[in-house]
Amino acid sequence: MDYPKLDLPRQCSVNTAMLVPPLEDEAAQHVEPVKGPNVSSLPELSPLPDEIEAPVLLKVGDNVSTDEISPAGARALPFRSNIPKLAMFSFTQIDDSYPERAQQAEETGHIIIGGDNYGQGSSREHAAIAPRHLGLRAVIAKSFARIHWQNLANFGVLALEFDDADDYDNIDQDDTLHIAGLRDALADKETLQVDNVTKDTSFTVRHRLSPRQVKDVLAGGLIPRLAEDEQ
């Protein structure tokens, strides 16, 4: 078949009645945005610290989906523009105690351990934003679904893969993991050492982040990094 060709109209019409001119600068300074009760601003995302020592709050298996991370449905979706409220539904299909335990670990942040294809399914950004709001700093998995892996970087969550998949079996929920020298390690090399403080063992992980993604994660996410570039 022939390659399809799109014939555009010679003249395009724009309904200018639908356009509202911007306010003058002085008037615009006094305009307060009106938000509904379930609309909140995007939470501020802090930069990645140089050292993480935090508990493993969840250890999940293979093919955990973004729907299991941030559920859809009539209970959760009304809060899709209210990140603090939506975050309280995170992982509740797997462990309904996760949101409360994450809040209790706010000072240190926390880590999640995953199996193969972590974050498969729909590309919803909320599956990265909501756990990040609850203090998720890193996910260590056997492998990641591509789009969720990118979304984690966009919101400042460090995605790491086991060098040896068998190390997954040696980590339990509530173990405390320690990763030091993150900023230099992410910039200079692909492998990092993780110490299991609870079991007094160590293992290596790797990241596949591009230099741009490393900058995003270090800044706390894509939005904070762009804000830095504007300064």
Image (cartoon, rainbow, N blue to C red):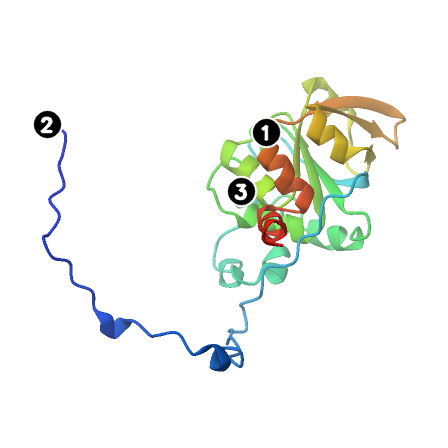
- Density class for disc 3 (Cα within 10 Å; few <14, some 14-19, many ≥20) is many
- Residue that badge 1 annotates: 62
Amino acid under label 3?
Answer: Thr
Q: CA distance from mark 3 to mark 1?
A: 12 Å
Is any part of residue 216 visible from this angle?
yes
Nearer to me, 227 or 73: 227
- Density class for disc 2 (Cα within 10 Å; few <14, some 14-19, many ≥20) is few
Give x and y (percent) for residue 129. 59, 50
Give x and y (percent) for residue 195. 84, 28
**Foreground label between 3 and 1:** 3
Secondary structure at badge 3 equals helix
Is any part of residue 70 visible from this angle?
no
Disc 3 vs disc 2: Cβ atoms closer than 8 Å?
no
Q: Is residue 219 left or right of residue 11?
A: right
Q: Which mark is residue 2?
A: 2
Q: Say if 192 sits above or below 123 in the image.
A: above
Q: Which mark is residue 66?
A: 3
Give x and y (percent) for residue 35. 51, 73
| Residue appearing at x 27%, y 72% in the figure | 18
**Foreground label between 1 and 2:** 2
Q: Say if 205 sits above or below 77 in the image.
A: above
Q: Quadrant of residue 21?
A: bottom left
In the rendered image, the quadrant that contains the N terminus is top left
| Residue appearing at x 59%, y 59% in the figure | 42
